[in-house]
């Protein structure tokens, strides 16, 4: 058994195993001089759309652009409010602002850490109605709410049956933030089918940041949608608003996916299911190993969900001491995320105060992400579990 430090994530080994195929991607790009857009991007888009089970995929520069373009193309913009969660990476909210809209936060479910449909429903039911559109008016912003952005956090799909049914009752669009959930599945009660992230809303955003379950060789993102018009608009938005070179029908952005990223992603997409299976097996092993540890809450996976464990997140009220203890034993951990978005300095003018989102705030204070990556070995997991167990003994003595 090794006593080496256990990293939080290992991005070296999977790339070393694919080195020849990945180097070939560079060779092809250099020899064809097709660097931006082109055949590789088209091929990746078709393959990722097919993988998700979506009609269209449009590659973009990163996940933040994916959320922003998805909202804009679905019709969200200036004067609109969007409901989302504060227990997410800030990019979800940046993208809403960058689309020209304003954010309204609702709390999360304490077990899944995703948007709570109950809280969402109560929130919307209590809003005043816009006399023109009939839509609920955001309680903070006073703006008519146009869309909901559920975040499939840590690799687990939010409760989409409930969220879609609420959205349809209040006539709201749904845009999925699937940036952490490549390949995650959810079983809808309406048809009993298991469907992948990226197929539930008007559009869905993915990030291919290197540490994601499907990561590029730098930055990358994509939007999936079943709506050809939404896809066509995103193709324009990502490319300076042009559908024909130098004829700009709208003001767009430089938000394209480049060919090397697409080629890289094509090679790695073939391994995504196997890697996700390894993550799921590692999560099951952690669940077993940690089941006896008092005061440690392991992740909750509803029967209708197959998480892809982008992160394996436990919780404990003494999270900081536990993290410190693990560090001294060579176990790296992460915090996703220590300060919820509604309490970030950059949004202090929005007027949210501590206590505004109690479930979110408590989670932020207690969560701890343990090492999780494909290839995490059973003996490494045993060492993590032993380290957690030894902390419990120390904590009891204190
Ligand atoms: C939930 C969520 N949304 C959006 C993003 C933004 O993606 P990117 O970093 O590719 O812009 C991320 C990436 O970290 C994320 O985790």
Image (cartoon, rainbow, N blue to C red):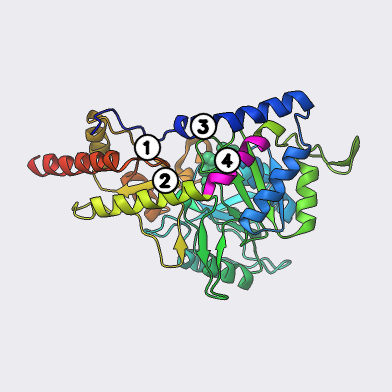
Q: Which label sits on residue 15?
A: 3
Residue 296: where, in percent of width, then height? 24, 51
Q: In which quarter of the image is the N terminus?
A: top left
Q: Within 10 Å of the Cα at label 4, are there few (<14), some (14-19), or many (20+) other Cα atoms?
A: many
Residue at position x 26%, y 54% in the image: 288
Report helix, strand or loop for mark 1: loop
Q: Tag on residue 334?
A: 1
Element under disc 3? helix
Q: Which residue lies furthest to the top in this view?
A: 30
> Which percent across, then down, holds residue 28?
72, 29
Is residue 82 toward the left or the right of residue 59 in the image?
left
Q: Mark 2 points at which residue?
A: 311
Asked whether residue 361 appears in the rendered view, the answer is: yes
Tell which circle, 4 or 1, labels the residue nearer the N-terminal end.
4
Q: Mark 4 points at which residue?
A: 268
**Secondary element at image label 2:** loop
Using the image, determine if residue 313 lies above or below residue 197. Answer: above
Residue under the point 69% across and 69% down? 134
Q: Nearer the viewer, residue 168 or 183?
A: 183
């Amino acid at each position: 058994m090794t006593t080496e430090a256990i990293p939080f994530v290992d991005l070296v080994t999977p790339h070393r195993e694919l080195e020849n195929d990945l180097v070939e991607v560079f060779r092809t790009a250099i020899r064809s001089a097709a660097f931006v857009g082109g055949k590789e991007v088209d091929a990746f888009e078709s393959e990722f759309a097919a993988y998700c089970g979506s009609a269209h995929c449009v590659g973009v520069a990163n996940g933040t652009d994916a959320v922003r373009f998805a909202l804009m193309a679905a019709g969200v913009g200036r004067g609109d409010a969007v409901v989302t969660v504060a227990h997410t990476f800030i990019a979800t909210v940046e993208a809403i602002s960058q689309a020209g809209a304003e954010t309204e936060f609702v709390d999360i479910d304490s077990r899944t850490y995703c948007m709570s449909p109950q809280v969402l429903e109560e929130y919307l039911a209590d809003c005043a109605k816009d006399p023109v559109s009939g839509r609920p008016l955001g309680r903070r912003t006073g703006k008519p709410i146009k869309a909901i952005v559920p975040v499939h956090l840590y690799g687990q799909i939010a409760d989409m049956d409930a969220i879609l049914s609420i959205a349809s009752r209040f006539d709201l669009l749904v845009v999925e933030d699937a940036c952490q959930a490549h390949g995650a599945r959810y079983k809808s009660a309406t048809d009993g089918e298991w469907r992948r992230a990226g197929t539930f809303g008007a559009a869905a955003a993915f990030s291919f940041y290197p540490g994601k379950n499907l990561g590029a060789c730098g930055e990358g993102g994509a939007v999936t949608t079943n709506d050809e018009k939404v896809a066509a608009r995103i193709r324009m938005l990502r490319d300076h608003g042009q559908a024909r070179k130098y004829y700009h029908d709208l003001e767009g952005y430089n938000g394209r996916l480049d060919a090397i990223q697409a080629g890289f992603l094509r090679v790695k997409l073939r391994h995504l299911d196997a890697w996700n299976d390894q993550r799921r097996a590692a999560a099951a092993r952690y669940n077993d190993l940690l089941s006896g540890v008092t005061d440690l809450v392991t992740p909750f996976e509803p029967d209708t969900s197959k998480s892809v464990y982008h992160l394996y997140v436990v919780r404990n009220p003494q999270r900081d001491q536990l993290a410190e203890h693990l560090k001294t034993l060579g176990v790296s951990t992460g915090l996703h995320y220590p300060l919820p978005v509604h309490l970030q300095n950059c949004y202090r003018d929005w007027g949210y105060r501590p206590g505004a989102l109690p479930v979110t705030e408590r989670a932020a204070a207690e969560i701890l992400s343990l090492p999780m990556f494909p290839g995490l070995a059973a003996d490494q997991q045993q060492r993590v579990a032993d380290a957690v167990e030894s902390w419990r003994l120390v904590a009891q003595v204190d």
